[in-house]
Image: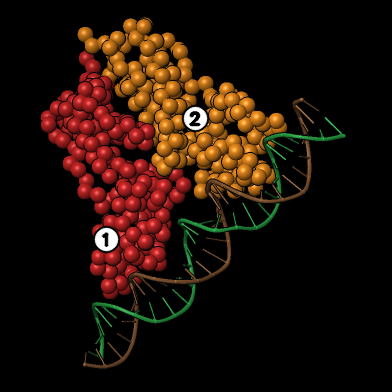
Chain colours: A orange, B red, C green, D brown
Amino acid sequence: MTDSEYDERRRSIGARRNPEAQEAILDAAEAILIEDGAAAFSIEAVARRARAGKPTIYRWWPTRGTLLLDIYHRQKPAVIHADTGSLEEDVTLFIERLLEYWKGGAGQVFRVVVAEAQRDVACAEALRTYAAGRRRQTAAMFERAIARGEISPDTDSLLAAEMLAALAWHRLLTDRLAIDRNEAKTVARQVVRGLKVSD
Amino acid sequence: MTDSEYDERRRSIGARRNPEAQEAILDAAEAILIEDGAAAFSIEAVARRARAGKPTIYRWWPTRGTLLLDIYHRQKPAVIHADTGSLEEDVTLFIERLLEYWKGGAGQVFRVVVAEAQRDVACAEALRTYAAGRRRQTAAMFERAIARGEISPDTDSLLAAEMLAALAWHRLLTDRLAIDRNEAKTVARQVVRGLKVSD
DNA sequence: ATATAACGAAACGATCCGTTTCGTTCAAGT
DNA sequence: ACTTGAACGAAACGGATCGTTTCGTTATAT
């Protein structure tokens, strides 16, 4: 839930009091996911840990998916995208930083979001929208390289960005987040060389 | 469950009668997944539809994950890997065929397997092993291209194979299996060009 | 001070979990 | 052909979670 959505919902319900209950719930939900794992995540467990009532949770998050997405959004996003002037270096850093970021709690949360999206269409739609936004950010990396004349101007930057993200998802979902700099460099070299102006 | 594992389990239990009950359960489970979706998939629902007792199901599949993997394994695997003599064409066909294959039931099942693997470590391990095997098959495509001198001999063929599979997973998990030949070709061109011998 | 509405707590019927019990039904061994 | 044994279907078990409803309580806005 974004800030504006939050305010809008708060207004529409006419919530007068909502001080830190919201945050306590998110704190509890996040802690359960990270400490006890996805299998232990239930609305009842969250309510117990947050000392909140279930109706309060359901008032603000109608489905599991919305709560999970809120937890993920609340994670402090790491600085993922670099702008070093070299696409190959940018891509290397992107892969390294994303996997590193996912090692710390956020990955655990995101895994569950992806899993939930496979059985909740609303969650799937929200995830698709979120992923598309991130893809545009990553694509900007390639756009800059095009502007620099580093790669071919007819590059499908969104597709290139998706291939990077897809690799990261695949590592996350198969629990293989560890990556050394050499492997990240290999990925970057291979992807970037495929886009170079060929003449 | 593989055939040998099946026989082994059958022997170890001393099953005398087990004719088509097994298949009826798998049929029912598959039908529920495909017709009613992942949210409707429960052992009770499978037992009801198969007119089987829950203990029978639990006897053969101790966890949801093992049952789900059996269902996926039972799907007739499409002919995915081609050997046209051109790596770019092989890769194009691989992407096209895999996404096409996943459109028909198998994808729905595989999505649930991946989701289940996020909360069941045994299922995760089985999926990792299965995926690694498929990856080796796909890597053979690149090995052939190396043998033909089509791409650089120091190519990391397993990594290249994983990037293709990762893209397919990403499409599957975000419910975007539709792909036209042009897009598949773009993927193939980009990947293959990145591996070409550079001189 | 009073009205208002979110809140926590508890209980609801429902579903599913994984297991246990029990009578039945086949297929093997004698 | 008869007996034995084991898998089977059906039913019920206690437990957990679902999403909802009810009911005092509590804090805030007027």
- Quadrant of the rendered structure where residue B197 is? top left
Q: Is residue B199 above or below residue A58?
A: above
Q: Is residue B12 above or below residue B4?
A: below
Give the image location of residue D1, x and y in percent.
Answer: 21, 93
Task: Name, please, the residue furthest toward the left.
Answer: B85
Mark 2 → mark 1, Cα distance in angstroms: 44 Å
Residue flagged by tag 1: what amino acid is it?
Glu
Mark 1 crowd level (few <14, some 14–19, many ≥20, 10 Å Cα) = some
Q: Nearer the viewer, residue C20 or D12?
A: D12
Residue flagged by tag 2: what amino acid is it?
Glu
In the figure, is residue B169 to the left or right of A16?
Answer: left
**What secondary structure is marked by label 2?**
helix
Query: Can the viewer see residue B125?
Result: no
Asked if labels 2 and 1 share a chain, the reply is: no
- Quadrant of the rendered structure where residue A19 is? top right
**What secondary structure is marked by label 1?**
helix
